Image (tube, helix red, strand yellow):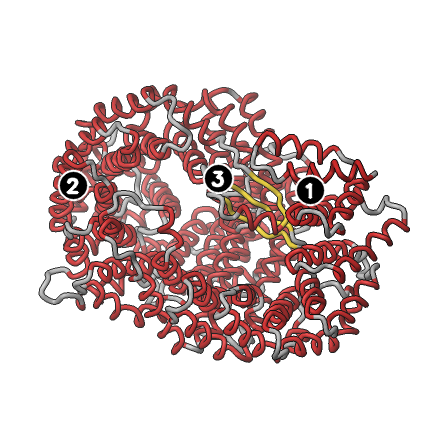
Amino acid sequence: MAAEQQQFYLLLGNLLSPDNSSRKQAEETYDSIPGPSKITFLLQAIRNAGAAEEARQMAAVLLRRLLSSSFEDVYPSLPVEVQNAIKSELLLVIQLEAQSNMRKKICDIVAELARNLIDDDGNNQWPEALKFLFESVSSQDVGLREAALHIFWNFPGIFGNQQQHYLDVIKRMLVQCMQDQNTPVIRTLSARAAAAFVLANEHNVPLLKHFADLLPGILQSVNESCYQNDDSVLKSLVEIADTVPKFLRPHLEATLQLSLRLCADNSLSSMQRQLAMEVIVTLSETAAAMLRKHTNIVAQAIPQMLAMMVDLEEDEDWSNADELEDDDFDSNAVAGESALDRMACGLGGKIVLPMIKEHIMQMLQNPDWKYRHAGLMALSAIGEGCHQQMEGILNEMVNFVLLFLQDPVIASLLQTMEDQGNPRVQAHAAAALINFTEDCPQTLLIPYLENLVKHLHAIMVAKLQELIQKGTKLVLEQVVTSIASVADTAEEKFVPYYDLFMPSLKHIVENAVQKELRLLRGKTIECISLIGLAVGKEKFMQDASDVMQLLLKTQTDFSDLEDDDPQISYMISAWARMCKILGKEFQQYLPVVMGPLMKTASIKPEVALLDTQDMESMSEDDGWEFVNLGDQQSFGIKTAGLEEKATACQMLVCYAKELKEGFADYTEQVVKLMVPLLKFYFHDGVRVAAAESMPLLLECARVRGPEYLTQMWHFMCDALIKGIGTEPDSDVLSEIMHSFAKCIEVMGDGCLNNEHFEELGGILKGKLEEHFKNQELRQVKRQDEDYDEQVEESLQDEDDNDVYILTKVSDILHSIFSSYKEKVLPWFEQLLPLIVNLICPHRPWPDRQWGLCIFDDVIEHCSPSSYKYAEYFLRPLLQSICDNSPEVRQAAAYGIGVMAQFGGDNYQPFCTEALPLLVGVIQAPDSKTKENINATENCISAVGKIMKFRSDCVNVEEVLPHWLSWLPLHEDKEEAVHTFNFLCDLIESNNPIVLGLNNSNLPKIFSIIADGGVHESIKKEDLCGKRLANVVRQVQASGGLFAECVSQLNAAQQKAIQDLLSAP
């Protein structure tokens, strides 16, 4: 045994070896040792005070890992006496251990074992550990007190179901340790333990209240420990702000003041100052309403963030650097910018903007480039964070900044971009301009376009010269993106400047082939394709062939591009834009494009499941992000390539949409890629693209025949239904639901089997129940003590999200009703009580609107069988015609229209009852205002349908003249077609009321038809358009009457009549 133990020490040494092959071999040997033997050897090594310190520490780490990852495989199978020996051995070793570091590692093992020895009912099966805790925490030996606190900090749930019983004891123990005047380390550790206990009980409100008076002690310890160069308690405070912000409420002012003071103290390290700022910024995200009551603190925090952003390196090289260094991203400047962005998002522009505007203006005018740089970065940060307020703030800034300049914001940005002495500042000015133009409405940009383009062109030419002479490229990269952003916003207004830029941009793509210019080349390819899309096919065609050749050359010359080459993602997006510009002509390029695109769309991310301590050593590693799974476990994912994958998937959607049957040959490989990606939870954009692609791929594949189409649908159907049931993100969920509805419309009757219906019914029922539950929860939040108008805004956002999902439930039901007709009604009955609940008078108007839309579909597609359910919806439907909400009125009026058209005889008396209500809405004084017009037009259409399909319900001769006076419909294009078709019926049957005595009404009819053309309510290629054209031609044949009719029209109306006649 001794010999084996000796060999094990050698093995531990090799596990620490810097030599890769020795270490790998040692890892394989270690893995092959059976679990129980591992425990024996590791415990032996830990206990042996004579062994090398490094080997003992390694043994402790390995034993903790073993208990963490393989407890169930190893520990329960050990004989009870061995289990008892391990437990008592560990507690004894803690007491004997002289080295503080080693003692902590043994405490970690004890905490891990204790965690695993709490059974499902919360019984702690290691009572000796609790006894040890109580004895040690009161011990005279500082090392033992530290050990007890360390174990409790590592596993605050150690008391299991006895916690409530010991609550006062735990509190007393923590208070006593926090007040230990002689030992700073005990004060620090007890504050961390108290914070860990609070975090572990985040949902236990009475407990949090009971422990609220520990917070002053924690804050005192934060302050103390920071000046001992220890930020562990400060990190705990950030966690509390993130997870249980309400715990801070009783002492919020003190918490904020402390954070502010530490943040402003230049004697502390950058990391500590950033952490102190993080407390305030986190609260702006997790407890915005609570923080908004302390605007004085926010007003003081903003200058601190701006001061951090000015904290840039003094050296000449930094401001002239041509590459962005990685360490730039840990700097105070970056932390300040991120804090500002997050705070603007968290608290909202109404609070943040007035506080910051003045500061930014002063910074942009400061002679020191660092202040100008920081001002621009701040403008970028708030630009992205508050784009709802963007327009208002831009207008104010335009009036406020630098009065002697024609346009302050853009002019000051352009001035800064011409700051030739500081390329960094120039690059960030260009970046701020990108943010500005992306969020800027076109109308606001146009007045400055000429000036903007002139400056951008001058800078581009100068920087292109610099690239040729000196090889510097940072500013040029940003300027090229600025040009793209301006073109993207300006759209066709960019046409006059096209020839100014295109030759230089093509020159860059042709000549910037060196490896260090890959990013510049990629951005230029993006710029060219965005300009092409902005100016349109006609203008771009002169260069389209050259550009396609350049892209093809790049694709073939660089077929061995490295996976991380930045050109790949720019190329992928550029191809898709070219497809949008060229349309069907793009199909010939697919064989070249699809290979790299499928490769990028198929990227599989690197993932790992780690325990939290391993994660800490990896988190420095480039590109890893972690999700805490609780119980000391974390899930890590390497994010490199994810954005590129999402872009590639989006581009596949673009090809399917643009090329339709031209994409048919690729549908099989694309659908096999996309269906599994509905569960790709690492990136929302990938799942959205996967969902979007489904109905488009079915459309593309139609040309391959019904059998192929059905196979493809079977491949995707289950995954879509499961996606609706399990998707956690509401934006992605709405996309999956929308796509599913579209797929059913494509596939039609018979596309779902009984299992599909059963699963779908359960899911939709769940969605509707969740909808009602969420509304109740929002009502509870409105009673909260922190409720204010900004909380109401965010509750409204939540409500909008919920309603959006409700619209998608309606979409799915619409597609099912329109495909399956009345056959589906028995299945629908499980949802009926919930839909009836939606249309109750006390529900919010969107509920009533969408509930009525669902019943409209039942009437339209399932009549006459729909009458079976009339008792549930008829009264609410009739009452809703005069509802206060125009959206509800519209849904009700549409329902009356389809009732007349499809409902059958049972509905006759209700059409009669509805008629005066519809007329009342149409004749109301404000019926044609913007918010009411859609509802009114649906009422007009409904009256027309009652006359057409239910003439026995109505005195047609009396109503018809009124109905004519309400035409034409402008807004609701679908209902406009119904009304024009009915008008044609009446004219073609020579209805005397419509034509008037001696055709005296024809000028009026002409003006109705002409107005329909002007407002694009008539499509001349449709059947309705052709019928109207025939009416006009018949009058044209009668000579003088035609001239009289046309003479009464204005120029736009006359042109509309000519267009109608010129249709083939």
- Residue 174 sits in which quadrant? bottom right
Q: Answer above or below: position of 978 versus 262.
A: above
The residue labelled by disc 1 is 758
On residue 463, the disc is 2
Identify which amino acid the numbered label 3 is placed on: Val
Specify which label sits upstream in the sequence, 1 or 2.
2
The residue labelled by disc 3 is 686
Q: Answer above or below: position of 687 versus 405.
A: above
Give the image location of residue 223, x and y in percent. 50, 73
Give the image location of residue 136, x and y in percent. 75, 69
Give the image location of residue 468, x and y in percent. 16, 33
Single out the residue that lies furthest toward the left.
404
Specify which label sits upstream in the sequence, 3 or 1.
3
Q: Count residues near mark 3 (Cα–Cα under 10 Å), then give few for <14, some for 14-19, many for 20+.
A: many
Residue at screen point 50% across, 61% down: 798
Single out the residue that lies furthest toward the front.
50
Residue 565 appears in view: yes
